[in-house]
Image: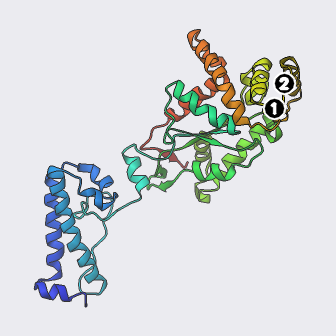
Amino acid sequence: MPVRSVLDWLGVEPSWLKDTATGLLVEADQFDPLGDWLDVIREADPERWSRLKGTARNAMDFRIAAEVLLRYYEDLAQEGHALPIAPPRGRLRHELHGRLKPRRGIDKILTSFGLSPHPSLILVVEGDTELLLFPRLMEMLSIRNDDDFISVQNAEGVDKDITALISYAIAPRIEKEADGHLQMLRPPTRILVVADAEGRMATEVQRARRRTAWVDRILRTLPKADRTLPVREAIDRLVYLDTWDRRGQSFEFAHFTDRQLATAIGRIITTHLPPPLTDLIERVASVRSTGGNLKVLLHGASKLDLADELWPVLQQKVQRALEHETETRIPMIRILDRATDLAQELPRRNIVIPIH
């Protein structure tokens, strides 16, 4: 069917479609209680609009009617039967501002309201043990463990390359402003990597180099003209690297004694009769002194089995520390304190980065 046939049937000019739609939108703006929240509503599935109530629903009906007329007008303009609708200029409110056609990316809209599904901080741990125990400890301490606050991720080994994760998740989404600043289109996500001091993370110098490489990789996601010193300094505040303690011990050795580890290992060995506890303690101590991995003592049991067995021990240790106000001596709590501070420090909206 020719696009103009409906217009001829109605017996009106194309301008009537645009003028009528504009009038509906202006009237809807005058009584719509949604206000600026319309920016969020218009991005939602249209089926959800029917759940609006009262005057908000009435205003939505006005906007739907206007959108039908405007979509038809745009079809006419595309075929050369009407003048195209001029795009809005500058920051002034356009007469068709209230139409339901999406105007910008959802990240930018949500950020303007201080909302985002992206985490404030990604806490990267080395393995399955930490991935199991961190959410349990967060729940015990009443720390939010939803992914839009602190998201705990598994690096699957100290030497695993997580550069791709960092460049994708941490690189800021930006839009250049006329005043020379970079406007963030979504709230910043920071990253805190907690690693055992071994492999390519063994020394402080190696860890510093690794962190610098991550910052460099994030910077390369931006246009060359925007890779200035102030921008690099801003990105530098998004990336952090830590170890469990000053001695560089692994997670298990930083949190549990040889006896505690040996007792837990003895309980999870099922393939054969475990050795006496005194022998297990000596073997654990030997692994600790050589910087080895406790897997050699598990005889087929998994690190997750060991983590489950150690959880009650950690619970008791944390409870006693809380009672004596010495909880910051426990590495996991120290890391969680730092993660929480980092996650809460930066605002979730109106963030700009100076270029110069």
Vertical arrangement, residue 247 with respect to residue 191, above or below: above
Query: What kind of element bears circle 2?
Result: helix
> For residue 90, what is the image quadrant?
bottom left
Name the residue at 25% across, 87% down: 3
Q: Which residue is mark 2?
A: 284
- On the question of residue 148 being in view, the answer is yes
Q: Earlier in the sequence, mark 1 or mark 2?
A: 2
Residue sitting farthest toward the top: 324
Figure quadrant of residue 313: top right
**Percent coordinates x, y for residue 167 in the rendering:** 63, 52
Residue 201, how many percent across, how many down? 78, 38
Q: Nearer the viewer, residue 328 or 24?
A: 328
Amino acid carrying mark 1 in the image? Leu
* Distance of label 1 from label 2 (alpha carbons): 7 Å
Residue at x 25% of width, y 63% of height: 99
Judge the density around disc 2: few (<14), some (14-19), many (≥20) Cα neighbours within 10 Å. many
Count residues near mark 1 (Cα–Cα under 10 Å), then give few for <14, some for 14-19, many for 20+: some
Q: Are marks 1 and 2 in contact (CB under 8 Å)?
A: yes
| Disc assigned to residue 106 | none
Q: Secondary structure at mark 1?
A: helix
Answer above or below: position of 57 versus 142.
below
For this rendering, which residue is in front, 33 or 205?
33
Pointer 1 residue: 294
Side of 218 where 38 appears, left or right: left
Percent position (x, y) of residue 150? 54, 37
Q: Which amino acid is tagged 2?
A: Val
Residue drawn where x is 16% and y is 60% of the image: 26
